[in-house]
Amino acid sequence: MLRRLFTLLAFALFLPALSFAQDQAAGQFRISGRVVDKETKEPIPFASLGLKEEQTGALTNEFGFFQMAAPEKVPQDSLIILALGYYRKAVAIKRGVNVPDMIVEVPRRVVELANVTVKGAKVKDLSLGSRNNTPGEGMIQGMPGSQYAFFVKNDKNKKLGNVRSVSFYIGENGFPREPFRVRIYRADGNYNSPNTDLLTENVVVSAPKGGEWYTVDLTTYNIEAPTEGFFVAMEWIVSGDKFYTTNFMDTYTPYGQILRPTFEFKESRTWSYTMGKGWSLLTLASNGQRYNAMIRAEVDMLKD
């Protein structure tokens, strides 16, 4: 029995090497490994990795593991690692070389919270974003690692405090109870796209059912809302022992929750993010109204 156990273990350890050897014989090369915290060596789940020139990417699973194809277009490419709450890191990767068991250590970003003192101000609840309770026709569904971010605009220039909660209208179809990650961004990227994370901790949630609004309480994170507004994003992730790379997009079946759209705005406020390619503005329209993700936020409104 013990001999059989050791045989099975040896075979399991041999499989990755065999797979790499088969790919190399076919002229295909791969990168695999783990992304970990530089100090604690703990795995970082749902980190995004992308080859800059190749424009392909991968997402780590819950245990920090990833796998993706090596570069083919250029002799040397940069593997960019992005993880929530950590500094961006780049690693040089050569073409035509297998890189197995790679360990990428990423330094944590220290976030200093500003002390906000409110003197003599009355705090009221303010709703920003979608006001509809009936979604528009269509659906928004992403691959793991992709995001849809909606800009909750402070249209009336109210004095804002902290973000209380964010809500997503989850479709009744698909797999509405699958987990997703909540992201909050400042609109300080190119062309006012999402860029700086305002929520620097992993908030992974799942809705109990679809066909209705699902609200996530963020009061404990003390997120100060920018005066002009901010982006609220849904990020599709992978769970369990699976991982995902953009190289498998042709055969990958979307598995996860569906975000419903709204047509209540005349301007495009929704951006989509694809691993390896970045952010792009959605410009679809219907009868003069723009196609936007059905998302809203509740924030503190300060009144003197």
Image: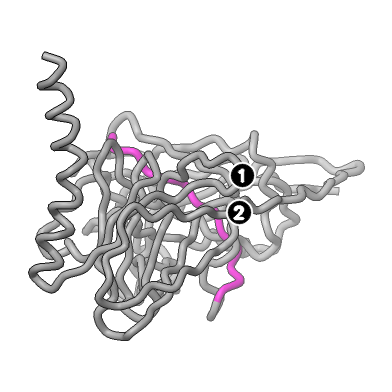
- Residue 186 in magenta stretch: yes
State the residue in front, 271 or 105: 105
Say if mark 1 contacts mark 2, CB within 8 Å: yes
Give whichever of discs 1 and 2 has the lower sequence position.
Answer: 1
State the residue in front, 79 or 277: 79
Question: In the image, what residue occupies the spot 13% across and 73% down?
Answer: 27
Residue 243 picture location, percent across and down: 27, 49
Q: Is residue 280 above or below residue 73?
A: above
Bin the neighbour count of mark 1 within 10 Å (Cα to Cα): few under 14, some 14-19, many 20 and up.
few
Question: In the image, what residue occupies the spot 64% across and 34% down?
Answer: 220
Residue 25 picture location, percent across and down: 9, 68
Report the quarter where the N terminus lies.
top left
Q: Secondary structure at mark 1?
A: loop
State the residue in front, 215 or 67: 67
**Left or right position of 270 against 193:** left
Residue 115 picture location, percent across and down: 84, 46
Q: Name which quarter of the figure residue 212 lies in.
A: top left
Amino acid at the residue labelled 1: Glu
Question: In the image, what residue occupies the spot 66% across and 65% down?
Answer: 228
Label 2 belongs to which residue?
107
Q: Secondary structure at mark 2?
A: loop
Question: In the image, what residue occupies the spot 13% across and 52% down?
Answer: 18
Amino acid at the residue labelled 2: Pro
**Left or right position of 196 against 63:** right
Q: Name which quarter of the figure residue 201 lies in.
A: top right
Q: Which residues are magenta?
A: 177-189
- Residue 33 in magenta stretch: no
Any part of residue 142 in sight: no
Label 1 belongs to which residue?
39
**Left or right position of 222 against 38:** right
